[in-house]
Amino acid sequence: MANKLFDVAPEILIGIAIDVVVRGQESFVAGFGIADPLHQVYLLGALTLAIWVFESIFEFAYIVLWRNLAQDLQHELRTSAYAHVQNLDLAYFEDRSSGGLVAILNDDVNQLERFLNGGASDLIQVVVTVLACGAVFFAISPQIAVMAFLPIPVILWGAFYFQRKAGPRYDVVREKVSALSGRLANNLAGIATIRSFAAEQRERERLASESLAYVAANRDAIRLSAAFVPLIRMAILFGFLCTFVRGGQLVLDGTLQAGFYAVLVFLTQRLLWPLTRLAETVDLFERAMASTRRILGLLATPITIRDSDLTQPDHAARGEVAVQDLHFAYANGSEVLSGVDLDVQAGQTLALVGATGGGKSSLIKLLLRFYEPTRGEIRLDGRPLASYPLVWLRSQIGWVAQDVFLFDGTVRENIAYGRPAASEAEIVAAAVAAEAQEFILRLPQGYDTPVGERGVKLSGGQRQRLSIARALLKDPPVLLLDEATSAVDNETEAAIQRSLARLAHQRTVIVIAHRLSTIVHADQIAVIERGRVVEQGTHDQLLAGNGSYASLWRVQTGGVAGSSK
């Protein structure tokens, strides 16, 4: 506001200077006791210098303050939205692309930042300009003031009309950005698959189609914006001509001083020409509002996995797990678990086996509270999982997934992810226990070797062993292994099994395995088919029962009988 007040002052001084030159000792300035016209010019020169200095100071101040505000707001909004996304249940991500979420967290937040960097301060300055110039106009000539202000209602009507029409168009633009970001993220993640199928041309065409849809949506909005600018210019021209012509008549009639006429002509431009930028400002505003609606929509997404407000235990979990009449179905899907009952004592190993799609991995995700049961419950140490704070609960569980995810960092950082403060000796011990030490030392930089995004620089077996080392370093009372040895060769699998066997007595282990040879020593084996536990017992008991487990064993061993002894 201060910057804009100093910004319009030079036009007033020009008019006063003309008044001094024309009227001399009878000028407006002479009324303040400075009779000598030369002294009046000196005074005006000093005022001009001071005005330009202060205008520059306040311009520097408002640019810095507004842009810092924009930076602070976009930072807080992005981190708040990301924190909210982290707390959403996994079902939310099943129907949404990661690229679309990145577009909201990055592009949409940046769009709001762009508006705050310039558009918001422009709106404030336009209001200040109208008020300041209006006060001068009405003080000099109310008649010309009315004429000069006649275009403003038309300009405002055009701005609000544009805003109303542009809003839906920019909503479409942001949706197209989201779709385009999703396509890019998906294709970059699957670049190896695209190349293996020689599908580069097809994917280029699909990306081009998404990009053209975005361009078309933008063109629709731009067309409306472009139509707004000529309307503004014609309205401004009308106001300027009214001031120019009517003011000239009043000067010729002797009812208006030439200096004041100059002030009005200069101020008319100062008043109306900035309004030509109103179209650009409203355009920025509508883009920012479309982005804001998407950000606020994300923040308004309800969190279904509610955290417990109870105080977390002051000791580690014993590891006793009880599953009681557990039912579960994914959203809009059939039931994948139907009345599952399991009881695992602390320190025992439970193996889950059965055909793919039987519900084994879903049970693991329920143990981590990634989802909530449809009916029934899971207890840890006699208490329902929902009664524990989520952070504490998940700190007590180590999870090695079948689809290993490594972060873009070094080997050391990935192993220590669950315990960032772990010592070098502890990191090495975990790597040794996971049979990863040998290959790590062969890497170019050893533990400081970058693994690349999602561990792309490592083989599947190497990624799996780092994932196991990461879980072992965390040293949780409960260890969940979802096909933890699926991506390793037989020799490495045997080594990992030896490590897990040494560690099993220290914790409760629940393992999903398709290779039955890896779980013959488990304390319990549960066969899950179509969401139900159809058999349960030790390896020997299940073989003797000659049921589903025995059939699976014969298929994998070629009909050879086996024993855990």
Image (cartoon, rainbow, N blue to C red):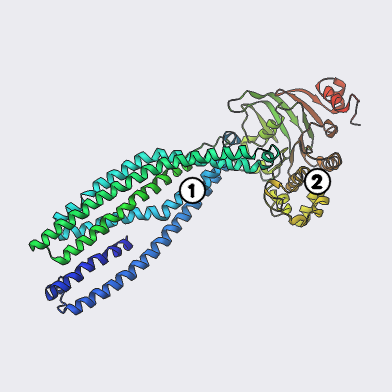
Q: Splitting the image into 4 quarters, where does residue 442 fall?
A: bottom right
- Asked whether 410 or 19 is in front, the reply is 19
Query: For this view, does 12 lie left or right of residue 197?
Result: left
- Residue at 80 percent of width and 42 percent of height: 506
How far apart marks 2 and 1 lie (CA) works out to: 42 Å
Question: In the rendered image, which quarter contains the C terminus?
Answer: top right
- Side of 249 where 325 appears, left or right: right
**Of marks 2 and 1, which one's residue comes earlier in the chain?**
1
Point out the frontmost of discs 2 and 1: 1
Q: Residue at x 21, y 60 (%)?
A: 265
Left or right of residue 484: residue 106: left
- Badge 2 vs badge 1, beta-carbon distance below 8 Å: no
Name the residue that disc number 2 marks.
Answer: 434
- Give x and y (percent) for residue 283: 38, 47
The percent position of residue 304, horizontal first and vertical second, equals 56, 34
The image shows residue 452 at horizontal and vertical percentages of: 69, 50
Residue type at tag 1: Val
* Total numbered badges shown on the rendered structure: 2
| Kind of element beneath mark 2 | loop
Residue ID at (49%, 41%): 214
Nearer to the camera, 184 or 44:
184
**Mark 2 Cα-neighbour bin, 10 Å: few <14, some 14–19, many ≥20:** many
Dot 2 amino acid type: Ala
Label 1: element kind: helix
Q: Is residue 214 above or below residue 131?
A: above
Q: In which image quadrant can residue 316 be found?
A: top right
Q: Which quadrant would the N terminus be assigned to in this image?
A: bottom left
The quadrant in which residue 286 appears is top left
Residue to which mark 1 is pinned: 109
Q: Is residue 536 visible?
A: yes
Q: Would you say residue 307 is visible in this rendering?
A: no
Q: Which mark is residue 144?
A: none
